Image: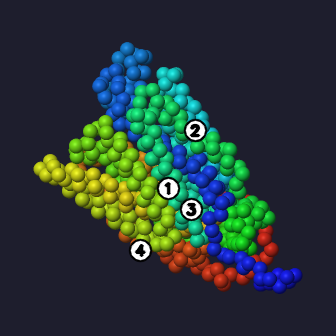
């Protein structure tokens, strides 16, 4: 191509996206203000282990001490151990229950306010609980913490479904994996910062814990001030709003000037043509829609496998393993921070490798490491009473498990779940995805302590089996999605679903763009 006025060649627009500044800043603003809340609030409530001093015991967890001291002020006596355990279990479990509710209202919100709009509105569910938790000590009301856990759980439930959708639609196909893993990267950053701030020498003490809980509002404020300056998802703008020019402008900002924007616009029009043939799907329709049968099953398996593979159980059991290896209970907080650093580093490594090695190999290797670690951990826990040195093997297994989960099962499902469905069904599919994620999270947290009491170390054999089954499903069913368009990925599933899905190249050029008809279906 030449410039007719000067005869000099013009730069050839490229089809490969790069990390432009607008794309990077949009990702940082959207991620830090949303799924960061998930990681931070999962860790912050449990991290100050056995470092507080309560009136009824020499060494105790600071939040439980506040609960018991408040109860004493009201009733003139302390709670018995069972009552305190029940109240504390209620506090912890309110978060995933809020997450379930948040995941169920995502469909309505993203259809009405878009991806960016939903993330901005969602900050309400972070700022209000941050204020309530911050004043709970002054108000002498532990009920404010319980209520806040529900609200911040709603925030996490919404953001954990919306952010992968937003980032997956912002990213060019060659960077979709890297940006998709940012969901889990920022979850882990939230966990790690909660672990660091929860150290007794910082805020994990009797005077600092209200600030520790209230810090969850800071990322929400940052997002409120920054995200409005960045573009909405071009796919949402074009396919669902019918605003072609705004979508084109957003793409130019996200991709840079030397990029073939029109080629990507045509790809989105192609996706829209496919969707007009399908129609918009509600959650209930999704379960009976044959062309998406195996995509839906795959989403459920990926999200259930992520939680049922044992990550929360390993974290729950880690304190016992560290103590049995001779780690002082009051010093285990530093070991936990160390595991958080490993978790973050390996998740970032996964973000780098996901576009080089692909999704399948990271998932399969991750589940292989996790299953092996659980198997060896079972042996170490069973024999450590007769061979004390095996307690150190238990610590190695915990760290190996964290490495394996950080490589594949934690970050990669956020990428794949967005890629394997088209725009018209993505909202409904991610609603199902979020509900499965939070329900399995809640089930493991509720059931594992009882299972552990009943069968002890053998409980980790259950996770070994589940890791093997999940890996087998991925190997047999889920295709590699690296570098493919959304339409190409759905073509790969079409044969397994027993339906015809015309190849992209066989589709004739469409008539001039017309907006999609608004759905007459509800989100459910």
Q: Secondary structure at mark 1?
A: helix
* Mark carried by residue 184: 1
Q: Nearer the viewer, residue 79 or 128?
A: 128
Q: CA distance from mark 3 to mark 1?
A: 10 Å
Residue 500 locus on image (x, y percent): 58, 79
Q: On screen, 56 above or below 364?
A: above
| Residue 168 locus on image (x, y percent) | 60, 63
Taking depth in this image into account, of 386 and 105 the one nearest to the observer is 386
Measured Cα–Cα span from mark 3 to mark 2: 24 Å
For the residues marked 4 and 3, what is the alpha-carbon distance in whole angstroms? 26 Å
Do the numbered discs 1 and 2 sit on residues whose CB atoms are within 8 Å?
Answer: no
Q: CA distance from mark 2 to mark 4?
A: 43 Å
Q: Which residue is mark 2?
A: 217
Q: Which residue in the structure is indicated by mark 3? A: 179
Observer able to see residue 353? yes
Camera-nearest residue between 111 and 311: 311
Q: Residue furthest left?
A: 386
Indicate whether 195 appears above or below 207: below
Residue closest to the far top: 76
Contact (Cβ within 8 Å) of mark 4 with mark 3? no
Q: Which residue bears the numbered disc 4?
A: 476
Which quadrant, please, contains the C terminus? bottom right
Q: Earlier in the sequence, mark 4 or mark 1?
A: 1
For marks 1 and 2 on the same chain, the one whose residue lies earlier in the sequence = 1
């Amino acid at each position: 191509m030449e410039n007719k006025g000067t005869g000099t060649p013009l730069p050839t627009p490229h089809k490969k996206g790069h990390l432009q500044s607008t794309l990077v800043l949009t990702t940082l603003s959207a991620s830090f203000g949303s799924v960061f809340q998930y990681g931070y609030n999962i860790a912050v409530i449990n991290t100050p282990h056995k470092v507080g001093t309560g009136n009824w015991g020499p060494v105790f967890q600071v939040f439980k001490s506040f609960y018991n001291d408040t109860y004493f002020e009201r009733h003139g006596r302390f709670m018995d151990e069972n009552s305190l355990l029940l109240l504390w279990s209620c506090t912890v479990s309110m978060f995933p229950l809020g997450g379930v509710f948040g995941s169920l209202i995502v469909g309505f919100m993203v259809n009405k306010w878009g991806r960016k709009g939903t993330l901005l509105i969602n900050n309400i569910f972070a700022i209000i609980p941050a204020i309530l938790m911050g004043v709970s000590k002054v108000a002498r009301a532990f009920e404010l913490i319980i209520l806040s856990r529900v609200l911040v759980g709603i925030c996490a439930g919404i953001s954990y479904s919306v952010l992968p959708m937003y980032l997956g639609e912002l990213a060019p196909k060659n960077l979709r994996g890297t940006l998709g893993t940012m969901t889990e990267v920022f979850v882990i950053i939230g966990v790690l910062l909660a672990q660091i701030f929860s150290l007794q020498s910082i805020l994990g003490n009797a005077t600092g814990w209200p600030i520790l809980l209230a810090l969850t509002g800071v990322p929400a404020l940052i997002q409120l001030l920054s995200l409005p300056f960045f573009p909405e998802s071009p796919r949402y703008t074009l396919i669902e709003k019918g605003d072609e020019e705004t979508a084109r402008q957003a793409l130019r900002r996200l991709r840079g000037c030397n990029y073939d924007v029109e080629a990507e616009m045509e790809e989105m029009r192609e996706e829209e043509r496919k969707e007009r043939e399908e129609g918009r799907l509600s959650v209930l329709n999704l379960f009976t829609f044959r062309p998406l049968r195996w995509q839906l099953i795959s989403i459920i398996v990926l999200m259930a496998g992520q939680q049922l593979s044992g990550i929360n159980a390993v974290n729950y059991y880690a304190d016992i393993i560290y103590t049995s290896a001779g780690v002082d209970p009051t010093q285990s907080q530093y070991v936990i921070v160390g595991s958080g650093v490993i978790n973050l580093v390996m998740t970032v490594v996964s973000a780098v490798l996901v576009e080089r090695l692909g999704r399948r190999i990271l998932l399969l290797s991750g589940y292989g490491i996790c299953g092996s670690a659980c198997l060896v951990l079972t042996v170490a826990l069973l024999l450590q009473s007769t061979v004390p040195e095996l307690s150190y093997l238990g610590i190695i297994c915990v760290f190996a498990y964290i490495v394996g989960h950080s490589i594949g099962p934690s970050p990669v499902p956020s990428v794949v779940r967005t890629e394997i469905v088209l725009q018209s069904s993505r909202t409904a599919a991610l609603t199902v995805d979020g509900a499965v994620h939070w329900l399995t999270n809640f089930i493991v947290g509720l059931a594992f302590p009882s299972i552990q009491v009943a069968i002890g170390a053998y409980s980790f054999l259950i996770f070994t089996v589940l890791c093997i089954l999940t890996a087998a499903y991925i190997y047999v069913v889920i295709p590699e999605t690296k570098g493919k368009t959304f339409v190409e990925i759905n073509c790969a599933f079409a044969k397994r679903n027993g339906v015809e899905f015309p190849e992209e190249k066989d589709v004739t050029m469409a008539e001039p763009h017309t907006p999609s008809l608004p759905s007459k279906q509800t989100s459910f």
